[in-house]
Image (cartoon, rainbow, N blue to C red):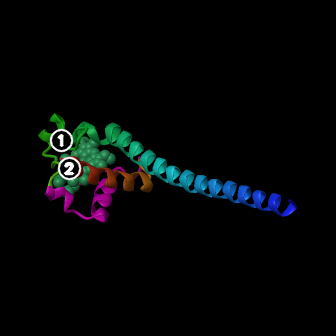
Amino acid sequence: MAVRKNRDSIVCTSAILIVLVAEIILFSASRARAGGGQDSVAAKATFRTKCAMCHGPDGAGSEVGKSMNVPDLRSDAVQKVSDAELAQIISDGKGGMPPFKSSLSEAQIHALVSYVRSLRQKK
Ligand code: HEC
């Protein structure tokens, strides 16, 4: 009888452990997803406030931007530029584009580079 009880409680404890482990795995996975999502939501907001006046909300170029000859950020010409160069252009500016290194952190600039990449995928 005592042995039987013991075995039941072992089964019960392992079931609880399995559920706990599964929960931890699911929890960290959903946190990782939420984190990535937050980053791109933030980059989208930054893009809308700092860049869309020239580049348009979708990167195609606003009226103001077109008058300044902004390239379509979704185009191959821009997409083939390396991440490092895009980050450098955003921080130092280029032609009619102002530099952003004093108003954006390096992390924000990197998030914007990924955002510019994501514009192409939507095409
Ligand atoms: C005042 C208008 C203006 C604003 C604001 C602006 N840009 Fe630009 N951007 C330009 C112009 C003009 C060019 C073309 C520069 C050139 O090639 O001479 C350009 C070019 C670019 C390019 C392409 C560079 C290349 O040669 O491939 C990228 C990427 C870019 N901008 C990203 C951004 C991002 C990200 C922001 C917001 C942080 C931003 N821009 C804000 C005007 C602007």
Q: Residue 85, percent across and down?
A: 28, 63
Q: Residue 68 lies in what quarter of the image?
A: top left
Q: Secondary structure at mark 2?
A: loop
**Label drawn at residue 101:** none
Give the residue at x 17% y 43%: 60
Give the residue at x 60% y 52%: 23
Closer to the camera, 89 or 95?
A: 89
The magenta segment is 76-103
Q: Residue 79, percent across and down?
A: 20, 58
Which residue is tagged 2? 73
The answer to whether residue 95 is visible is: no
Q: Marks 1 and 2: in contact by CB < 8 Å?
A: yes
Q: Residue 52 lies in what quarter of the image?
A: top left
Q: Residue 96, percent across and down?
A: 20, 48
N-term mark: 2 or 1: 1
Which residue is tagged 1? 61
